[in-house]
Amino acid sequence: MVQALDHETEWSDPAMSDAVRRVDAVADELVAAADETERLGKLSDRSVRAVKDSGVMRLLQPEEHGGYAAHPRDFAEAVMATARRCGATGWVTGVVGVHPWEIAMLDPRVGQEVWGDDQDTWVASPYTPAGIAARVDGGYVLNGRWQFSSGTDHADWVFLGALTGDATGKMEMPPTFLHVILPRSDYQIVDDSWNVVGLSGSGSKDIVVQDAFIPEYRAVPHEDVAAGIAAERVGRTETLYKLPFPVLFPLGITAAVVGIAEGALALHLEYQRERVNVAGARMREDPYSLFAISEAAADISASRSQLLDGVTQAFDQIEAGRPLSRQQTMRIRRNQIRSAWRAVTAVDEIFARSGGTAGRLENPLQRFWRDAHMGLQHYIHTPGPVFHASALLEMGVELPESLRGAS
């Protein structure tokens, strides 16, 4: 029975980043805590401590608040390294780890409020505009309910999406889509709202807000973040904070899915190495099984490379002073989505060849399989509108109104 990953398997480039080395240093803790994390339906304290010890949540955090302001490629590599050991922990790392990047684009007062006392403070989300932010003097009054707040039990703040309304709470027409940030005292977590087949340990519970006041400085238009211009408005000059939301936000989520696929492949390789089938034949001598392994490994590797290539190209171009075109942004999104689907398809191929033992609950392979599929369910991995828009842009065709918001 396969019990754990072979931690010595190297997936990243030979010049492994310091971020990945830090995750590797806590790998044993991540693996050992994975079952408890799933049982709890949220990250175990052991998992949280390992993530904080690795520093991965501060990779995109601004330097003045104890962060590394690292290259986003390093962040993606670290998320993959985490997800290879525990899918739920990798998922939370990929989602929550992006939020320090956006805080850097807000009024400096926000960073001080969040990290003034503890530079390891976490911020959850989601950004779905599921609430109404009614305009009042000095800010907004927010009401609503949001699903899928990953890692929220361990966060002291939350980013939420909202649509603007008038003083009576009636939505404006047309509304402005805002990102707003609230402290833990201003929202409730619905404890029984996360019962799922995969990524159980991510604790992606519902959030409820009733009549919370949001100061103006804790809100930013989604359009400004999506276009990569929010940072400039608060005086940020670092390339990292000029990246557009459709390039950076999906990165951590898809990196987690690819890392989960790598973890599944590592377990499959370990199992197949010594497996003997009912006919007494060793699986490592079966050419059909070996073909399937190599095909899956190639697809997972391609997913990793394509995902990292997209964000690296975007970073390099913006650093050179050339903003991304709509076509380039959609191309990166298209490839990011395809990376996730390709990786999960590869997981299906190896799981189908792992025999009945793979389905035993004590075998971590089945957890990686379930986690991979749940990760694919995130709306950021929905191919339809993005693929449609990307194809039209590649043809030089202007997007119809219905697709102009696709990202």
Image: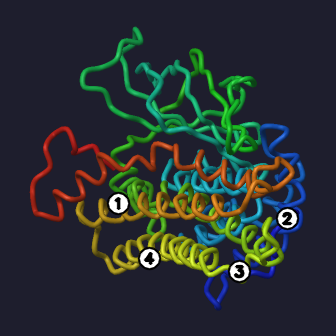
Colour convention of the picture:
rainbow
In the rendered structure, which disc, 2 or 4, sits on the residue that comes first in sequence?
Answer: 2
Q: Which mark is residue 334?
A: 1
Residue visible at 12% across and 63% down in the picture: 395
Q: Nearer the viewer, mark 2 or mark 4?
A: 2
Residue 69 placement: quadrant: bottom right
Q: Nearer the viewer, mark 4 or mark 3?
A: 4
Q: Amino acid at mark 1?
A: Arg
Q: Which residue is mark 4?
A: 309
Q: Amino acid at mark 4?
A: Asp
In the rendered structure, which disc, 2 or 3, sits on the residue that comes first in sequence?
Answer: 2
Left or right: 310 with respect to 252? Answer: left
What secondary structure is marked by label 1?
A: helix
Left or right: 37 with respect to 312? Answer: right
- Residues at marks 4 and 1, CA–CA distance in whole angstroms: 13 Å
- Residues at marks 1 and 3, CA–CA distance in whole angstroms: 29 Å
Quadrant holding the N terminus = bottom right
Cβ atoms under marks 2 and 3 closer than 8 Å:
no
